[in-house]
Amino acid sequence: MANRTGATVSMDVGDLRDDSTTRSDAGNEDARAPVFQVDDLSVYYGSFRAIRNVTLQVEQQQITAFIGPSGCGKTTMLRCFNRMNDLIETARVEGCVAYHGVNLYEPGVNPVEVRRRIGMVFQKPNPFPKSIYDNVAYGPRVARMKGDMDEIVERSLRRGALWDEVKDRLKSSALGLSGGQQQRLCIARALAVDPEVILMDEPCSALDPIATGRIEDLMEEIKTEYTIIIVTHNMQQAARVSDMCAFFTTEVNEKSDTRTGLLIEFDRTEQMFSNPSDERTENYVTGRFG
């Protein structure tokens, strides 16, 4: 199993270490090998089941969008891919989330290493109260990455489509950037530790259309190097940027008045928006509910 840089990722359960085998390029038969295989996944918060029995596959170097009404478990599902739900005391995961064939929830898997390989960008930009430079350098320093830090910062900011705007003020506070610039900084910060996967939880919901367009253009540019999973409420955005689309909805328990998320349909985006196989999907993407 290979990482983005070309080194095969030997997903030993104990340490998620890299070995030296090289990855074949994007033109061969492995270019669309699955990164994640999710089988019969359910997530609980205490006794409440937030999502149930989700099965889907995420492939390399594609953008996969999760869509659906509020409360259907999209973000909960997203957080399963890098074990962010571990940080919630009452959360419990059942089923399998296999990353290149290894269940991320098996005993012995290091969640810190999982989150290095599988980065996350949150709904609201969250730059650290540090300089632009130190925001990007933070992860590589913590991970004790080798190499010239100036080069790592510049490369990450270029990948985040922000270098030209900030190269003359790297020592300035990141909090002085605009909202769209802050979000691109957070993307650059995630890229700085050289992950394979980027998870994005409604990254454009707080941005204006111009900033949103820049983030979408950035996603299109970097998907040749990274696998991206995005949660979005914006149907037009999902149709514009994603290759695959998963539609979630809620199942209401009338006795307890609780709502559990479930996956209704997972298909190529073009197919989902033009000829969905489930009436509930069609009603949602055409705006008849949700």
Image (tube, rainbow, N blue to C red):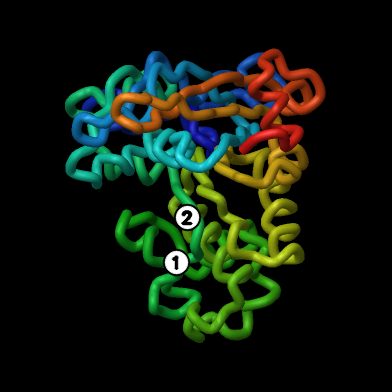
Contact (Cβ within 8 Å) of mark 2 with mark 1? yes
Residue 108 position within the rendered picture, expressed as x and y whole percent measured from the top left: 18, 28
Report the residue marked by disc 1: 126
The spot of residue 199 in percent (x, y) is 50, 43
Instruction: Indicate whether 30 appears above or below 232.
Output: above
Q: Quadrant of the C terminus?
A: top right
| Residue sitting at the far right | 274
> Given the image, on which type of amino acid does mark 1 rest?
Asn
Can you identify the residue that label 2 sits on?
122
Please state which of residues 280 and 217 is positioned toward the viewer in this rendering: 280
Q: Residue at x 42, y 66 (%)?
A: 137
> Callout 2: helix, strand or loop?
loop
User: Could you say where residue 269 lies in the image, as x and y percent from the top left?
Assistant: 72, 28
Pick the front one: 237 or 47: 47
Residue 45, by quadrant, is top left
Q: Residue at x 75, y 58 (%)?
A: 213
Pick the residue in front: 112 or 267.
267
Kindly indicate the quadrant of the structure image that contains residue 44. Answer: top left
The x and y percentages for residue 74 are 48, 37
